[in-house]
Amino acid sequence: MLLPDYSEEDEEDPRVEITRPLLEYMHLKSAAQDLAEMEILARDVFTRPGDISLRKQLEEEGPELEANIFLLISAFKRIVEEEGLDTRLRIEPPRWSVKEKTAYLLAELRAKRMLYFRDVFKNQSNLSEFIVTFLALLELVRAGLVSISQPTEESDIRLRARFDEEEAEEYE
């Protein structure tokens, strides 16, 4: 009789079909245990609470809006208009340098630690001095020595010192 030749290669071991899902299950269970041992969403991390007095002070002041360059420019324009300065272009040698005004602002912030934007421009004599002072302020903000904020949209912009004596001396 002619029967097809069944070789051992064609037959699949029935035990493989049973053990494959079991091996996959054991692998997934092991991975789940590894994940359970890891910190998830910092649930096992404990931090020290912040300074209570500082927290109360910040809550009393309310949240502040961080001022950006556009707010500074519009505030600067408003101050120039209120002062009634002559805004016509004149070419003249500068009487002050940005470095001199930077040193002046650092000295003021050293003494008071906080200034209002409007107060920075008091006692300025002309438009070129306003501009040099504004550039010095932008330089201090860029260097990270001064932070600018605004408690509400209608209030004056605040300048706060973010430096210690060593940083101020290095910058001067």
Image (cartoon, grey):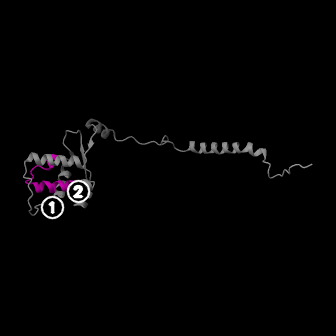
Residue count near mark 1 (Cα–Cα under 10 Å), binned few <14, some 14–19, many ≥20: some
**Is 81 part of what is drawn in magenta?**
no
Q: For the view shown, which residue lies furthest in the right direction? A: 1
> Is residue 5 or residue 93 the one in the foreground?
5
Which is nearer the N-term, disc 1 or disc 2? 1
Magenta stretch secondary structure, dominant: helix
> Is residue 139 or residue 20 the one in the foreground?
20
Q: On screen, 131 above or below 38? A: below
SS category of the residue bearing label 2: helix
Residue 59 x, y percent position in the rendering: 29, 36
Mark 1: which amino acid? Ser
For residue 23, which quarter of the picture? top right
Instruction: Please give the residue where the numbered disc 2 appears in the rendered image.
Output: 139
Residue 160 in view in this figure: no
- The residue at 17%/53% (across/down) is 134
Give the distance between the C-alpha atoms of the residues marked 1 and 2, in whole angstroms: 12 Å
Instruction: Please give the residue where the numbered disc 1 appears in the rendered image.
Output: 97
**In the figure, is residue 113 to the left or right of 36?**
left
Residue 33 x, y percent position in the rendering: 60, 43
- The residue at 34%/41% (across/down) is 51
> Is residue 54 or residue 117 the one in the foreground?
117
Q: For the view shown, which residue lies furthest in the front direction? A: 2
Q: On screen, 147 above or below 97? A: above
Badge number at residue 130: none
**In the figure, is residue 96 to the left or right of 25?**
left
**Is 126 part of what is drawn in magenta?**
yes
> Which residue range is magenta in the image?
116-140
**In the figure, is residue 61 to the left or right of 27?**
left
